[in-house]
Amino acid sequence: MNDIKENTSAALSHVNAKGEANMVDVTEKSMTSRTATAQGFIKMTSETMALISQGDNKKGDVFAVARIAGIQAAKKCSDLIPLCHPLMLSKVQVDFDVDTANNQIKVTSLCRLTGQTGVEMEALTAVSVACLTLFDMCKAADPGMEIFGIKVLTKEGGKSGSWQAQASENS
């Protein structure tokens, strides 16, 4: 059991040598430009898609509210995820791609800063909360909506450099 704990501790940066939760010390890390992008999808009925596309949702401009919610969520990520560092984000962008053929909306986010730690969690949080907000604003019309495919697409900067997710059918 100790071998597993030691190997896990080395592989997981938020676990100390004793296997306890631990906020990573980034004091000695270099300040570098860091960017991350993420995506997620929400699937709905064609009727709900039409309500959104035509601006007929009773709660108002669904995309404007979801965009603001996603941006705000990225800024509040460290309040939501216990071991995330509070970050001074210099850019948060949330975009929507309406796919009427598949009755789904792809939500993408971009987060950027110059700092000592990455922004993947902020990008994921922005996408997640934007999808949740779309759900909340449309649930009266379509309680069966499905949120899926939330993942990091890219990350740039820091010691580990650039990373890109492999393409999948929902990319």
Image: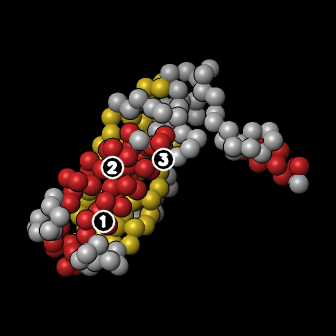
Give the percent coordinates (x, y) of residue 14.
66, 41
Give the CA separation, mark 3 to mark 1: 19 Å
| Amino acid marked by disc 2 | Gly
**Residue at the image position 53 percent from the left and 26 percent from the top:** 116
> Mark 1 or 2 closer to N-term?
2
- Distance from label 1 to label 2 (Cα)? 13 Å
Q: Position of residue 11 (x, y in %)?
A: 72, 44
Q: Residues within 10 Å of mark 1 (few under 14, many from 20)?
A: some
Counting residues from the start of the chain, the first of labels 3 and 2 encountered is 2
Colour scheme: secondary structure
| Residue matched to label 3 | 80
Q: Say which of marks 1 and 2 sits in front.
A: 1
Q: Secondary structure at mark 3?
A: helix
Residue in the image at 40% along x and 56% along y: 128
Q: Give 32 or 136, whichever is nearer the viewer.
A: 136
What is the quadrant of the C terminus in the image?
bottom left
Visible residue check, residue 128: yes
**Residue sitting at x 75%, y 39%:** 16
14 left or right of 58 in image:
right
* Circle 2: element type: helix
x%, y% of residue 93?
30, 43
Q: Are marks 3 and 1 in contact (CB under 8 Å)?
A: no
- Of helix, strand and loop, which one carries label 1? helix
Residue occupying the point 84% across, 52% down: 4
Which of label 3 and label 2 is nearer to you? Answer: 3
Task: Tell me the amino acid under the disc marked 3.
Answer: Leu
For marks 3 and 1 on the same chain, the one whose residue lies earlier in the sequence: 3
The residue nearer to you, when weighing 151 against 77, is 77
- Residue at label 1? 136
Q: Residues within 10 Å of mark 3 (few under 14, many from 20)?
A: few
Find residue 70 and name its label. 2
Between marks 3 and 2, how big is the CA–CA gap? 13 Å
